[in-house]
Amino acid sequence: MTQFAHVPVMPGEVTEGLNIREDGIYLDCTLGGGGHSELILKKLTTGRLIAIDKDEEALAYAKSRLAGYGDKVTFVHSDFKRADEVLDELNVDRIDGVLMDLGVSSYQLDAAERGFSYRFDAPLDMRMDKTQFLTAFNVVNEYNELDIADILFRYGEERYARKIAANIIRYREQQSIRTTGQLAEIVEKSYPPKERFKGGNPCKRTFQAIRIEVNDELRALDEIIGKLAERLNKGGRICVITFHSLEDRIVKREFQYLEAKCICPPKQPVCTCSKVQTVKIITKKPLTASEEELAVNPRAQSAKLRIAERV
């Protein structure tokens, strides 16, 4: 079993971005190993943190790590897209800050048995929540060719999506694709030899796409950001860390929508949309990890942090 290791991305930028009040109520939608949560808890005196994660192994580790904070922290096993329902269940109406650290964790990537990574030969799984039914095995072995190609193109921006999908179908006509190693071999052979290792491992986009499909990572992301922004007290902040362009575009667009005072067509003489500004964007351009951080945590390379404040 892989040891749970967790290095929080942009820790200083996150804590500064949240502008933490010692008596505030904060929501960590993606607890992971608890690194960001611990930074928040250290700044609370009479405040409270609600920490959500769909990965039970992450929850177990974080509960142990944060045990010393007692009832300052409430742990919830749930998907972050249910965060507003979680708050209702806890009878929490308003909050002072929200953190979302999206994507897969270092632990999940490094734990071979979880089946997230093309670096290890392991059973195809990729579930963040191991209580759910759908796995990467189901996607790869049961989806039709058109759907597989669509997932690879939509969620991985994979230019060889059709070729990879066709080769997956051809392979599984002979035998099931049961391991990450089998899938990686199919993907590599789908690339022209000269293109195969340009810009890194060719499996990256395919594995990302299938993981997003298995965990339903992008659906309703904009919706939950909007719901949580509405629950912020005035001056409360929402911080979202993304690791690929699909997530970042959704967050950027939703922040822009929440900041807008009017969404009527530009040439319409009178506003009829009744749109009300919810937030002001603090980061006109997303924050990225410093060179010093990248030297010790290279996985922060693709991280982008966007921050908005309730008005």
Image (cartoon, rainbow, N blue to C red):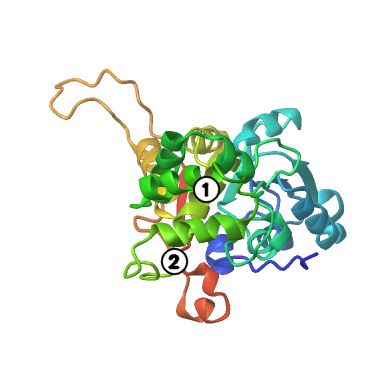
- Front-most of 226 and 60? 60
Q: CA distance from mark 2 to mark 1?
A: 41 Å
Q: Is residue 249 visible?
A: no
Residue 124 place in picture, x, y as percent: 65, 51
Q: How many marks can you see?
A: 2
Residue drawn 76% across and 66% down?
A: 2
Q: Is residue 168 left or right of residue 44?
A: left
Residue 204 place in picture, x, y as percent: 48, 60
Name the disc covering residue 288, or none.
Answer: 2
Name the disc covering residue 171, or none.
Answer: 1
Q: Is residue 238 visible?
A: yes
- Front-most of 107 and 252? 107
Residue 291 place in picture, x, y as percent: 46, 79
Residue drawn 42% across and 50% down?
A: 164
Name the disc covering residue 78, or none.
Answer: none
- Front-most of 127 and 106? 127
Mark 1 element type: helix
Residue drawn 15% across and 22% down?
A: 268
In the rendered image, which quarter contains the N terminus? bottom right
Point out the tag, 2 or 1, that comes first from the N-terminus: 1
Mark 2 element type: loop
- Front-most of 251 and 243? 243
Q: Is residue 60 left or right of residue 223?
A: right
Residue 52 place in picture, x, y as percent: 70, 45
In the rendered image, which quarter contains the C terminus? top left
Q: Amino acid at mark 2?
A: Thr
Label 1 neighbour load within 10 Å: few <14, some 14-19, many 20+: some
Q: Is residue 10 left or right of residue 264?
A: right
Q: Nearer the viewer, mark 2 or mark 1?
A: 1
Q: Amino acid at mark 1?
A: Tyr
